[in-house]
Image: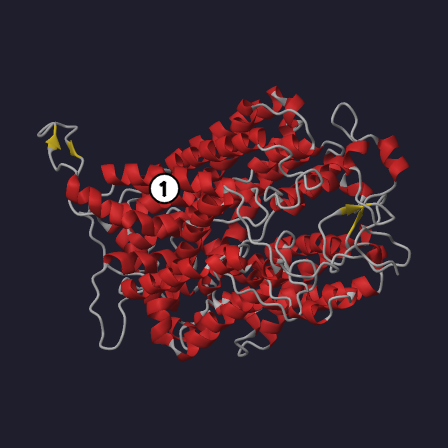
């Protein structure tokens, strides 16, 4: 175990060396610790608290509820579009500040029922940072997407089957709230230890300080408020270019411009449909859309993602494609499509019988389903990432987990923030247990009573819950230390696909209950850590999370249902007009996965009856990889760079591909290098004051301009048709190169 001083002596070590992540435990032995042993936390999070600040105010409830509703509506609305726009909670975090101050200055400060037990006032004083944090927790509930909506979209828009609104609501509510149970179980492991520092939270903490702390402007410099305002205006104004006037900035695939008739060159150079060699995206939505803000990622994690992307995209993919592994040249080099042996799109509806089950005779008549080699490899990478996560956590964090488990019922002080939080009443464990038991019961009832719509039996629910609780701790540790979250979507599909083949809706329900309840638990824990940093009473945090989650679930489903019912042919790329924005790229991947793992089943694709059985060796490779790093670290303990090799992150780097593309990764890694390595090492003062503030400003500027562009131009279908809006400009990148394969718009070899 390394000392705190060793952790903070260099860039790599201060980037939360996994082998030294137990440094937070050593700080528990000293009640004199004045700050976190993680340098980024020590530089960003205040070590003071004012417990007299009012938290549950009328302003908080009004602004928090409005933020949650608005973000939920906008994020679901933009999710179905060709270029999905995710509006983060940072936008609401900024927008509510003037509203909060306005309410504080105009609402009456009269005290109602004065002297009575239920005495209250609508205006307890100036708008303060703690109520602002709770508003942001509400907004966090509406940020991103609600994964269970994919089930509704797949059934209604792709399979063209019936699922009622009430059943959809039960599925959405149970999947969203189930994660509270796992979060409550692992709070002591993933929130209280200083080593679990949750890098993304530092963006919001930095922004809270910039918006609330009075700062004296240095001569010739800018306060953080001034810097934020300038960066916000720049981001807001700049997004007019990639968002409307010059969309090619999303992916500058310059190799395609030089070789406009070469399939090979465009396969290499396309940032959206190829390998992305030399591609660059000058668009913040391109950079942050799938991997989050690169400014919030510690450099060692960014380097692992970059190395994993390089390995998969520039070594494994070219070798397997040009060696024609699994008939690779018959299909595009980068695609999430489902194909026949001749390279044509597979007709899925032809292999579904009247009972919404696989028609085996029709499948055998049509022939086996094929994937692009890259798509098949991403599943292999998912297998390897899963086993790598388990082995990595056991090797590098096993002792820490054991020590924390033994002390779970002891009062231990791990750093100054845990010490400051000890004065508040904690959330009782039985609250979480009650939520867990009620939700599991409601889920079993829903799946059994409405089995004709959901197909999932009761034992599938219990198995999904078992997977979620088993993986919440290891994946939580990875997220809390690297800002990257390995997913359970592939292993859940794999398991239920073998146990219950031929039922596509059962497969996706099992995936959602197993994967998203774990993911929700990680999200709740991240919010708990934000409240931990900002000294919000835990019971108040809990209430805000529960209410925000319920509101968000209702708004997300209502918005999705409205769009699915009112937009003709939504998500159907064959029937929609060429300029229609409602193409649903993320839902296409989800639907394809339901066909592969649910309808046809893994045995007919990855098993003894399938083409891709060798992909299963990735499980073994993923388990061995962290062991090699651990052995190297034990053999050479003085080589500080060895334990920074995080195999779950490196192997799972391309887990978001597809729908993420090469340009998302290349641009993210470049900016992450400039922030996490160059600025952090050579301009530490600037990084401390401005890095996280800049991330928040870029997020919010993009979001506000994106919404404005849609309201002013998108609703009226006003667009510019010129070469600068030819997204990517690589029309031949998706062409197959096998001899005799005929695809419209592609040359025949």
Say few, some or many: other residues with alpha carbon within 10 Å of mark 1 (under 14 / 14 to 19 / 20 or more). many
Q: Nearer the viewer, residue 658 or 457?
A: 658
Left or right: where does residue 484 sit relative to residue 370?
Answer: left
Taking the spot 85% from the left edge, 32% from the top edge, the residue there is 360
As displayed, is residue 219 above or below residue 450?
below
Q: Position of residue 149 (x, y in %)?
A: 56, 36
Q: Position of residue 380 (x, y in %)?
A: 72, 54
Residue extending farthest left: 115
Taking the spot 49% from the left edge, 39% from the top edge, the residue there is 179
Residue behind mark 1: 67
Residue 692 is at least partly visible in this image: no
Q: Position of residue 393 (x, y in %)?
A: 56, 57
Residue 50 is at least partly visible in this image: yes
Q: Quadrant of the C terminus?
A: bottom right
Q: How is the image coloured?
A: secondary structure
Taking the spot 70% from the left edge, 32% from the top edge, the residue there is 159
Taking the spot 70% from the left edge, 42% from the top edge, the residue there is 592
Query: Image quarter for residue 580?
Result: top right
Left or right: where does residue 693 sit relative to residue 496?
Answer: left
**Secondary structure state at the residue bearing disc 1:** helix
Q: Position of residue 711 (x, y in %)?
A: 45, 44
Q: Nearer the viewer, residue 190 or 296?
A: 296
Figure disc tally = 1
Q: Nearer the viewer, residue 567 or 734?
A: 567
Q: Nearer the viewer, residue 260 or 412?
A: 260
């Amino acid at each position: 175990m390394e000392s705190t001083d060793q952790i903070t002596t260099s860039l790599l070590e201060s980037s939360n060396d996994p082998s030294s992540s137990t440094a937070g435990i050593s700080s528990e032995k000293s009640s004199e610790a004045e700050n976190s042993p993680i340098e980024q936390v020590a530089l960003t999070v205040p070590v003071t608290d004012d417990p007299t600040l009012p938290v549950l105010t009328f302003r908080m409830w009004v602004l928090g509820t409005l933020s949650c509703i608005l973000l939920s509506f906008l994020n679901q609305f933009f999710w179905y579009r060709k270029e999905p726009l995710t509006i983060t909670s940072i936008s609401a975090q900024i927008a509510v500040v003037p509203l909060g101050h306005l309410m504080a200055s105009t609402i009456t400060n009269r005290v109602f029922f004065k002297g009575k037990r239920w005495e209250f006032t609508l205006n307890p004083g100036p708008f303060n940072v703690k109520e602002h944090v709770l508003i942001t927790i509400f907004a966090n509930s509406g940020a991103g997407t609600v994964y269970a909506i994919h089930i509704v979209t797949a059934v209604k828009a792709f399979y063209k089957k019936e699922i009622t609104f009430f059943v959809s609501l039960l599925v959405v509510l149970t999947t969203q709230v189930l994660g509270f149970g796992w979060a409550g179980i692992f709070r002591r492991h993933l929130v209280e230890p200083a080593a679990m520092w949750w890098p993304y939270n530092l963006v919001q903490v930095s922004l809270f300080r910039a918006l609330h702390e009075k700062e004296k402007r240095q001569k010739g410099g800018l306060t953080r408020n001034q810097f934020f305002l300038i960066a916000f205006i720049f981001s807001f104004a700049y997004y007019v270019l990639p968002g409307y006037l010059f969309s090619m900035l999303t992916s500058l695939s310059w190799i395609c411009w030089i070789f406009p008739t070469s399939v090979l060159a465009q396969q290499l150079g396309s940032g959206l449909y190829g390998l992305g060699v030399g591609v660059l995206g000058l668009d913040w939505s391109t950079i942050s859309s799938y991997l989050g803000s690169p400014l919030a990622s510690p450099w060692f994690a960014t380097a692992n993602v970059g190395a994993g992307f390089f390995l998969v995209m520039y070594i494994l993919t070219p070798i397997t494609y040009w060696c024609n592994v699994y008939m690779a040249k018959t299909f595009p080099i980068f695609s999430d499509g489902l194909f026949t042996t001749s390279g044509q799109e597979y007709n899925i509806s032809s292999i579904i019988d009247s009972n919404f089950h696989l028609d085996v005779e029709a499948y055998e008549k049509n022939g086996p389903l094929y994937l692009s080699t890259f798509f098949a490899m991403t599943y292999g990478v998912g297998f390897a990432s899963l086993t790598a996560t388990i082995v990595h956590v056991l090797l590098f964090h096993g002792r820490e987990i054991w020590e924390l488990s033994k002390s779970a019922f002891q009062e231990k002080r791990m750093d100054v923030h845990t010490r400051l939080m000890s004065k508040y009443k904690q959330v009782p464990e039985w609250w979480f247990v009650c939520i867990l038991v009620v939700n599991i019961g409601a889920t079993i009832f829903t799946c059994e009573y409405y089995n004709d719509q959901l197909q999932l039996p009761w034992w599938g629910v219990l198995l999904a819950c078992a997977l979620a609780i088993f993986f919440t701790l290891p994946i939580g540790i990875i997220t809390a230390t690297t800002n990257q979250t390995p997913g359970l979507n592939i292993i859940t599909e794999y398991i239920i696909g073998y146990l219950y083949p031929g039922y596509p809706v059962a497969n996706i329900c099992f995936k959602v209950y197993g994967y998203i309840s774990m993911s929700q638990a990680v999200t709740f824990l991240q919010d708990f850590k934000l409240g931990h940093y900002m000294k919000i009473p835990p019971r108040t945090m809990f209430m805000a999370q529960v209410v925000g989650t319920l509101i968000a679930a209702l708004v997300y489903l209502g918005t999705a249902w409205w769009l699915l019912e009112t937009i003709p042919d939504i998500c159907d790329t064959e029937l929609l007009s060429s300029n229609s924005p409602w193409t649903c790229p993320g839902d296409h991947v989800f639907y394809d996965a339901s066909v592969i793992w649910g309808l046809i089943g893994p045995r007919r694709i990855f098993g003894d009856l399938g083409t891709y059985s060798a992909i299963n060796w990735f499980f073994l490779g993923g388990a061995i990889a962290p062991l090699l790093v651990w052995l190297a670290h034990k053999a050479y303990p003085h080589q500080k760079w060895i334990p920074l090799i995080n195999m779950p992150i490196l192997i799972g780097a391309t887990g978001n591909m597809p729908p993420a593309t090469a340009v998302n990764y290349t641009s993210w890694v470049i900016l992450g290098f400039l922030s996490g390595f160059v600025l952090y090492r050579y301009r530490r003062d600037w990084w401390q004051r401005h890095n996280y503030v800049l991330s928040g400003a870029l997020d919010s500027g993009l979001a506000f301009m994106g919404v404005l562009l849609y309201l002013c131009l998108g609703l009226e279908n006003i667009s510019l048709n010129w070469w600068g809006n030819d997204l990517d400009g690589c029309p031949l990148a998706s062409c197959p190169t096998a001899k005799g394969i005929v695809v419209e718009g592609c040359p025949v070899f």
